Image: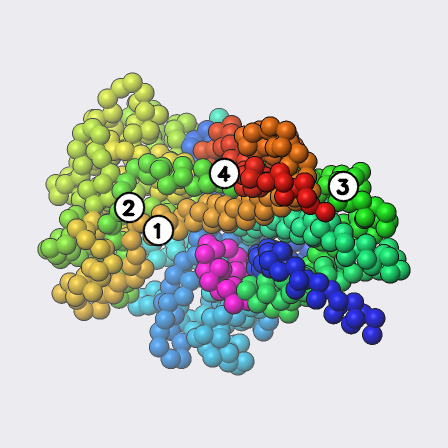
Amino acid sequence: MRVSSELASASRSLIRSGWLSGVVVLMLAAAIAAVTVVFSVANAVLLRPLPFTRPAGLVTLWGVDESRGPAVVELGTGDLRAWREQNTTMQRIEIFGSVNWTHSVTAPGEPFKATYAAVSGSFFETLGARAMMGRTFRPEEDRAGAPGTVILSAALWRRRFSSNPDIIGTSITIGAGADAQPHEVIGVMGPDFRFPAGAEMWTPAFREMDEFRRKAGAPATETFDFLRVFYAIGRLADGVSIERAREDLSAIARRVEVKFGNSESKAAVFVTPLTAYFFGPARPAVLAITGAVFVLLLIACANAAGLLLVRGAARHRELALRLALGATRRDIAVQCLSESTLLAVVAGAIGFAAAYLGFDVLVALVPADVPRLDTSAVDTRSLFFTAAVCFVMAVIIGLIPAWRLSRATLTDVLREQSYTSTGARASRTRQVLVVAQLAAAVVLLTGAGLLARSFVSLVRLDLGFDPRNVLTFDISVPEGRYRGDESQRALVERVLDQIQQMPEAVASGAIFQRPFAHGAIGMDSGMLLEGQPLSDESTARNPIVNWESVTPDYFRAMDINVIRGRGFNARDAERSPKVAIVSESLAARLWPGVDPIGKRFLSSGSGDIKPDWQTVVGVVEDARYREIQTPRFDLYLPFRQAESGVKHYVIRTSGDPMALVPALRERLRRVDAELTIENATTMERIVDRTIAPWWFSAFVFVTLSAMALAFAATGLFAVIAYAVRQRTREIGIRIALGARAADVVGMVVREGASLAAAGLAIGIPSAWLLSRTLESMLFAVTPTDRATFGLVVLLLIVVALLAAWLPARAAARVDPLIALRVD
C-alpha cells in the first residue's frame, strides 16, 4: 500500500511539473530506443555463440607479399600440403574457397542455381561444426576420382527441398551438359552455420580441383596444386600464439617459393583470429556504435538527473512544508526515487515501442554484408535488456537528487531562496553533471567528425572510372551451348552489337571482373619483362598485377581515360600480335622514367611462359577494382587474346540505366531466346554498397552525437536558467546600481562559457585517446586529425554560448523593482 501511495504521489508531482517531466521522458525514451535497437543488432551479430567449437583457437590464413603489390595472396592445395607437413604450431589446417562459385543444380522440381564453397575434407571437423542432419565429409571423399558428395545449408534445404527429412542419401546433379555430375547429399548444416558467407552448398576441395583439371583437358599428372583460389582455416596447437604461428608458416611459405626458383621471396602468411575474419569490419563498427549509444544513454541520465535536481531545488517551499510536517530524509529520498522510477518506466515503454516499430526501417540502413544481421529482432531478450536499462536508469537519475535533497534540513530549505551555501553545493552538483555531459558529447562529436570526414573522402575519391549512368549486368547462358572459346567470343560480340544499336547506349563493353565484384579477390598475374631470364625467380621480382580481359569499348563505357598510346580495337584478334594496356602506376613501377609504349613482357594470365611477347600499346588511369581504399597494378588484355573470357557487361547510358533493362532483355532474345539477364544494377549502386560501411558508421555517429549535443545543451540551458532565477534579486540590484544589459548578459554567458571550457578540457583529451579505437574504420583521416578536433571545439563553444545566451537575455530584462519585491 505504501508503494502505491508513493507512486501516486510521485505521479501527481510529475504531472504538476508539466513540460520538464515531458522533456525528461522524451529524452530518456530517445536514448532507450537507440540503445534497444543497437543491443538487438549486437545480440544477433556479436553476442550469440558462434557455430564453432572453441572458436578462440581458430585462425584464418592467407598469403601476403607486400613487396609485389597485393594485400592478399590466395592459397593452392600445394601450399596446404606443405603447411601440413612442415608446421609445428597448428593442430589442423584446412582450406575453403576464397569466393563462392555458382553451378546449376538438377533435383526433383525445376533446376536452379546455387552458390557453393569448396572445402577440404576435415573442414567441418576442424571448426567443430556438426551437421543438423546426416554427417559432414570424410577424408576419403576429398580425393581425386572420389564419388561426388555435397552438404546443403539449412536455408537451401528449406527453400528448394521443402525441408524434406529424407533428403539424406538422395542424389542431385551439379552442373549441366557434359559437366553434369551426380552428388550424394550426405548432410544438412544447422541454420546458424553460414561459413563461408553466402555458401548454400559445400563440396570437397581436392576433388573439385581434380574436376577442374579434367574439364580443362589437362593431363592427370598436372595437379593444379598452385592454382591459388583458397584461404585456409586452422586450429592453433595448445599454448601457441598467433605471432608464433605466423612466423612458423611464413618460413614454410618462403621455403616453398625458394623451391620454385624465387630465392629472394618475401612471402609471409597473414594469421588472424577466425572471429575477426567472420565478422570482418562489422565487429569494430558494432562495438564502436554500441559504446557510443551507451555514452548517449549516460548523457541522457546525467541530464535527467540534473533537470530533476533543478526541479527539486525549485520546490524548496514544498520541501519545507513536508519537513515541517515531520517528513524524514528517507521520505524525501523515496519520493525522488519514486519519481525517477515513474519517469524511467514511461520512457522505457515509449522507447521500446519506438524501437520495435521502427526496427526494420532502421536495420534496412545497415550494410547488408553484416553477418547474421537477418536474424536480429527486437525480441524477448531485448525486452529484458530494456527493463534492466530502465531499472539502472531509475537509480541513476533518482539517486543524485535523492542524495542532495534528502540532506537538506528545514533551516537549509527555508534559506535556499537566499542562495546560501547549501544552494551553492546543489549548484555545483548540477554544474558537474553538465560538464560531464559536455565532455561526453565532445567524445561522440569527435568520432562523428572523423567518420564523416572519412565518408566525404571516399565520396570524393577518384575511382579511375565514372560510375554515373552505367548499367552493369551478367548474362546467364544455357550450359553447354557455347563451349569453345571462339563460340563464346562470338556470343559476346553479338550481344555488344545488339546493345550498341540501342539509342540510349552511349558505349558498351565487357570485362572479366568488374570493379568490386569479389572484394579483395580477383585474377592475379605475374609478369616477366623482356630482357629478364625466363624463370620463376625473375617473375617473382616483378609486382603481382590485377589481370583483366576487356572488349575494345570497355574503357569508353567506364570513362577510363587512355593517358598514352591507344585503346584496344577490332584488329587485336587471336592471330594478331599480342598487345596489352597497363595502368599508370604499373607503367611507373616497371619502366620508371621511360615511355612504356612498345615495351614487351609475358604475363601468367596469357598462358604458360613462352616467348610469345605481349606489347604495351596504351597506358590508362589507375582504377580501383578490389579494395576501394587502395588501387592495384592493373593489366588489361584484349578479350580475343586472353585465355579467360569476360563475365560482366557495362553500358554507359544517356538516361536512367535501370530503365534500359526491359529493352535490353528484348535485344538479348534476338541473339538467343534462352539468354537471361542476371544481377542487373548500376555502378553507382555498387560503389554505394562498397562505401556503405563508412556511410552507416558516419550516419549513426552523427545522429548520436547530435542527440548528445542537444541533451547537453538542454542541461546547460536548464542549469544557467535556474542560476539566473536564483540570482534574480542580485541581478535586480546590479541593474538598479547602474549595470548595463550587456554587463548582465556577459556575466551569465561567462558562466556558460566556463562550463563549456571545463567540458572541453575533459572531453578533448578523452576523445584524443578514444579516437584510436576508430582507426580501422577511417579512410584518409588520422584518428588525431586536428581539423576535426578544431571543428568540434568550435561547434561546442557556439552551442554552449547559444544555450547560455537565451537565459542571459532574459536576465538582462529583469525589472529591478519587481526583482527587489520578490519574497
- Residue at label 1? 686
Q: Secondary structure at mark 3?
A: helix
Provide residue 470's location: percent of width, then percent of height: 24, 50
Camera-nearest label, 4 or 2 = 4
Residues at marks 1 and 2, CA–CA distance in whole angstroms: 9 Å
Instruction: Check if mark 1's residue and mark 2's residue have beta carbons within 8 Å.
Output: yes
Q: Earlier in the sequence, mark 3 or mark 2?
A: 3
Q: Amino acid at mark 3?
A: Ser
Magenta segment: does it hold 708? no
Q: Nearer the viewer, residue 806 or 140?
A: 806
- Residue at label 4? 449
Q: Amino acid at mark 4?
A: Gly
Q: Is 760 placed left or right of 528 in the picture? A: right
Instruction: Check if mark 3's residue and mark 2's residue have beta carbons within 8 Å.
Output: no
- Residue at label 2? 467
Magenta residue span: 356-377
Query: Which residue shows up at 30% across the image and 37% down it?
Result: 464
Which label sits on residue 418? 3
Q: Amino acid at mark 1?
A: Ile
Which label sits on residue 371? none
Chosen colour scheme: rainbow
One can see residue 131 in this view: no
Residues at marks 4 and 2, CA–CA distance in whole angstroms: 27 Å
Magenta segment: does it hold 374? yes
Provide residue 454's location: percent of width, then percent of height: 45, 38
